[in-house]
Amino acid sequence: MKKLILFSILTLIHSVSFSAVKGFNLTEYEGFEYDANKNAVTDEEKTPAQIAVDKIHALGSNHIELNIRARMQGPNSNEIIPVSPANESSTELRKIARLMDYIHSKDMTVGIRPIFFVLGPNGEFPFIEETPEGPKTWWHGNIQPANPDSWFLSFQNYLDRYMLAAKFGKADYFTIGAELYSMTVGLEDQWPEQPFGFPGQWLKLLRYTKAKLASVGTEIVYDINFTDDSNVGGAGLLKSGGELERWRYRLVDLADPTDPAEYEIWQNLVQFWTELDFIGIDMYRSLAENKEDTPQTFESIVPYLQKKSDAYAAQLDTTLLEIEITLDVQKKAILKEIGYRSVDNAFVDPFSYADGEGVYNEEHQAAAYRAIFESFWAPGFDWFDGIAFWDIPVDPRPQGQGDTSFSPLGKPLTEEQIKLFYQD
């Protein structure tokens, strides 16, 4: 334990030497919405969202991501439908702006992050379709709209609504898309008709968004998923990394193609990467395997998990450097979504959370947080610009000891790891 404490002190000395995002994703669900009472003085007068902001601030956080939700009815739909009905749009935007003002009043930055979920014909989530090849799970990363042009128009309309919130509340960041793998760089093994994705559409959308938000100085981010999924790259070799590895493959391994049509696609992807203000990284990677014998004490679990997290940090470092050398463009990156539930083996398949099952284990959650801090925060990578963990909900119920959600609130060991790195 003494070694961990000593290393923490050394890490803190380094961590305060640069300005980084120390953030959390604040999420809303039915009945618990983004809003703030401007005249509130006591906790009794504050909205649940304000109270959640106060608790995030108390952890040492300087940033909050507001996740706006929409749905897509099936993987081939051309429509993105906001959860909030159209006739409630102006009311919703005012509520979001009030909460953004409150977050800013705490000397914190705020980002707007519109996301969507793919639902089955009867609202099933996750949507698992039975196919001749076996069950297929559809999600926002592998969608195949029947008419991509119509889909992009609908997606732009969705973003338009929340660009208003970003402008109204002077958002510091706006996420133009998150983990839309098949639409950005393509999934040719799953969607052979559109093997390269639609970089030209993204470039137009980015420039449109920048023009709309230029007056408030909002920085535009696209969030790339960084997962254990493997891709077939050059020479037929498999390499893990999910969407990020496919970006690297497209930008680096397939640079300067001789075919004019492919060159245009590559150039659009280059420009999209270049003109983004930041790169977001959504990382749900296993830090251990089920078959492995996990150490039992916090002090022994952390270095055990850190072997994997160190490898992922090194991979990300190398990937960004490869792209930088190829394009002569250096980009800053933020871990925009990464999280671990407080359950046994939370660090194994951390993305598998829909069923909500698991046995409460705070040490495993805390150890995963600590490993990520040690691997990504401590080394001082020149591209690293902070973390926004998933998630703390507006709903005050999922917190405290015994709660198996992602929230670290009321879980002393997990909160301790966060404060070691977030509090100056």
Image (spheres, rainbow, N blue to C red):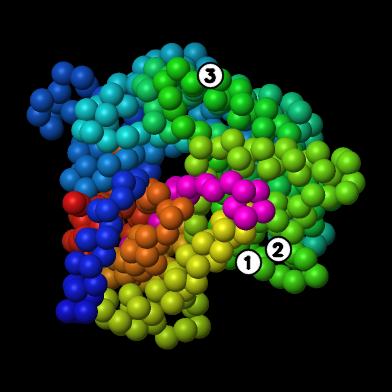
The residue where tag 1 is placed is 240
Asked whether 133 or 338 is in front, the reply is 338
Residue type at mark 1: give it.
Answer: Ser
Residue 316 picture location, percent across and down? 53, 61
The residue where tag 2 is placed is 231
Looking at the image, which residue sits at the far left? 42
Boundaries of the magenta span: 324-342
Q: Which mark is residue 123?
A: none
The reply to whether dot 2 and dot 3 touch (C-beta < 8 Å) is no
Residue type at mark 3: give it.
Answer: Lys
Local packing at callout 3 (Cα closer than 10 Å; few below 14, some 14-19, many 20+) is some
The reply to whether dot 2 and dot 1 touch (C-beta < 8 Å) is yes
Q: Earlier in the sequence, mark 2 or mark 3?
A: 3
Mark in front: 2 vs 3 = 3
Taking the spot 28% from the left edge, 24% from the top edge, the residue there is 101
Taking the spot 36% from the left edge, 55% from the top edge, the residue there is 406
Residue type at mark 2: give it.
Answer: Asn
Local packing at callout 1 (Cα closer than 10 Å; few below 14, some 14-19, many 20+) is some
Q: Which mark is residue 212?
A: 3
Taking the spot 50% from the left edge, 42% from the top edge, the residue there is 278
The reply to whether dot 1 and dot 3 touch (C-beta < 8 Å) is no
Residue 167 picture location, percent across and down? 43, 19
Looking at the image, which residue sits at the far bottom? 293
Residue 298 picture location, percent across and down? 27, 76
Task: Please tell me whether residue 102 belongs to the stretch shown in magenta.
Answer: no
Say which element carries label 2: strand
Q: CA distance from mark 1 to mark 3?
A: 36 Å
Say which element carries label 3: helix
* Residue 126 left/right relative to 148: left
